[in-house]
Image (tube, rainbow, N blue to C red):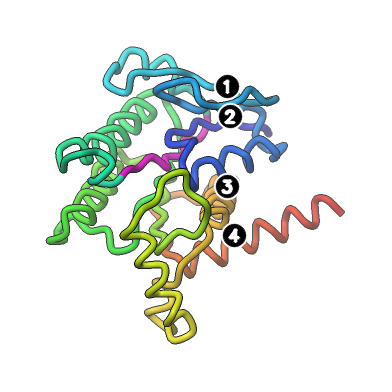
Amino acid sequence: MSQTAVVIGGTGLTGSHLVTRLLHDDRFSKVKVLLRTPSLKLRPGLEPIIVDFNDEEGLAQALTGDVMFCCIGTTIRQAGSQEKFRAVDHDIPVRCATIARRQGMKQFLLMSSIGASAISRNFYLRTKGETENGVMALAFPGYHIFRPSILVGLRRDFRLGEWFGYILTGLFYFFLLGRWKKYRPIKASNVALAMVYAAVNKPDGAHIYESDKIREMAEREKERTYRANR
């Protein structure tokens, strides 16, 4: 049965891969992408919706569908302050999730970050952890947290911290084994594949996936696609 997917953060590194993947997946008949400004070319199955993320009434009209994907995120440098960063990485996801749950959506898939924790001393990781907790408190039948390590892919914007982390972890890639394997860099396209895999398989309850598990899920989705196209 075809589903309607709703995506916020659909123009970023991972979100853009996700939208493309969903549009080429016949298990999804429509992909609604919520945007602040017009920035996507129209494609079959795509429904861009311009919204004010502070307008709950407008969001309620847009947040209708079967499954919601959240890939929205920024950096403190891009946002300009910790307060503005939190407004994007915490307030928008929790507000949209609250409305989506009220609208009857059964699944919520959130891209978070490796190391996310509501008790972290690091502001970025603490905010990510608080976002996870805020969405989890809504008790979606199916709730999926993706905690990737350093993302690999071509960004529109340069992120110094992410670039430095990629270089550092890349140097020690083959030494990151066992419990350290989750810190290996991962392709943003693989995160998108894993999110689709989780959405379609619909496991109930709360699930947390880190980079090693995300990579496994992505490979399973690739195998399914290969078999389907033979």
Q: State which tag comes first along the sequence, 1 or 4.
A: 1
**Residue 68 inside the magenta-drawn segment:** yes
| Residue type highlighted by circle 1 | Glu
Amino acid type indicated by mark 2? Val
Question: Which mark, by number, is residue 47?
Answer: 1
Gap between marks 2 and 3, in whole Å? 12 Å
Q: Assess whether mark 3 and mark 2 are in contact (beta carbons under 8 angstroms).
A: no
Residue 38 locus on image (x, y percent): 49, 20
Q: Position of residue 53 (x, y in %)?
A: 32, 23
Lateral position of residue 226 relative to residue 222, left or right:
right
Give the residue number, with chain letter if any, for mark 2: 31
Q: How many marks?
A: 4
Q: Which residue is mark 4?
A: 218
* Magenta region: 66-74
- Is there CB contact under 8 Å for labels 2 and 1? yes
Numbered disc 3: secondary structure: helix
Q: Secondary structure at mark 1?
A: strand
Q: Earlier in the sequence, mark 1 or mark 3?
A: 1
Label 4: few (<14), some or many (≥20) within 10 Å?
Answer: many
Q: Quarter holding the N terminus?
A: top right
Q: Provide the residue designation for mark 3.
A: 196
Is 78 placed left or right of 21 in the picture? left
Cα gap from disc 3 to disc 4, whole angstroms: 9 Å
Location of the C terminus by quadrant is bottom right
Distance from disc 2 to disc 1, alpha carbons, whole Å, reads 6 Å
